[in-house]
Image (cartoon, rainbow, N blue to C red):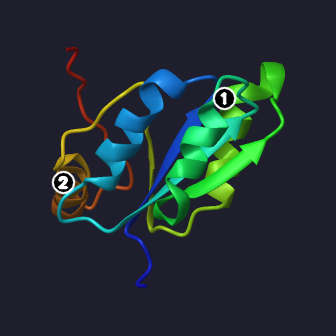
Amino acid sequence: MPTPRVSVIIPVFNGVEDLSGAIESALNQRDCETEVIVVNDGSTDGTKALIDYYGSKIIAIHQKNLGAAGLSRTRNNGVAASSGEWIAFLDHDDLWEPDKLASQLAAARRTSADIVYTNARNF
């Protein structure tokens, strides 16, 4: 398998109700090789079982809850496990349009940018 172009990091704590939507939106990116890394910060609500359901489609990291250090260290643990040329963060309760990453990579190439961001749309 070629090196993924983008490593998508999804941190989660007790997010079983929304997590599958985030994972699916990351897995369904068009025209972009991705690896999806889900970092479970000690969830107690069934999140672990949902992550395990995805099996080899994602990289799963299960860690003890980090408490106050939580989100930053959880994201950093995902980055440490990544192998992509680019890193993208997706919250467990957010969704991406199917061409989000391809559009951002095109913008980065066009402008020689090191960082690319987009607007959000609430629905």
Assign a secondary structure to mark 1: helix
Alpha carbon separation for disc pair 2 and 1:
28 Å
Residue 73 % position (x, y):
73, 37
Assign a secondary structure to mark 2: helix
Q: Nearer the viewer, residue 9 or 17?
A: 17
Circle on res. 71 = 1
Q: Amino acid at mark 1?
A: Leu
Residue 8 sits above or below residue 96 on the image: below
Residue 6 % position (x, y):
40, 61
Q: Amino acid at mark 2?
A: Ala
Looking at the image, residue 56 sits to the left or right of residue 13; the answer is left
Looking at the image, residue 61 sits to the left or right of residue 24; the answer is right
Residue 45 sits above or below residue 81 on the image: above
Looking at the image, residue 117 sits to the left or right of residue 59; the answer is left
Question: Which residue is painted at 79% across and 42% down in the image?
Answer: 63
Looking at the image, residue 72 sits to the left or right of residue 112; the answer is right
Q: Residues within 10 Å of mark 2 (few under 14, many from 20)?
A: some
Residue 23 sits above or below residue 69 on the image: below
Tell me the quarter of the image containing the N terminus: bottom left
Of mark 2 and mark 1, the one earlier in the sequence is 1
Question: Which residue is painted at 65% across and 39% down in the image?
Answer: 48
Q: Nearer the viewer, residue 116 or 64?
A: 64
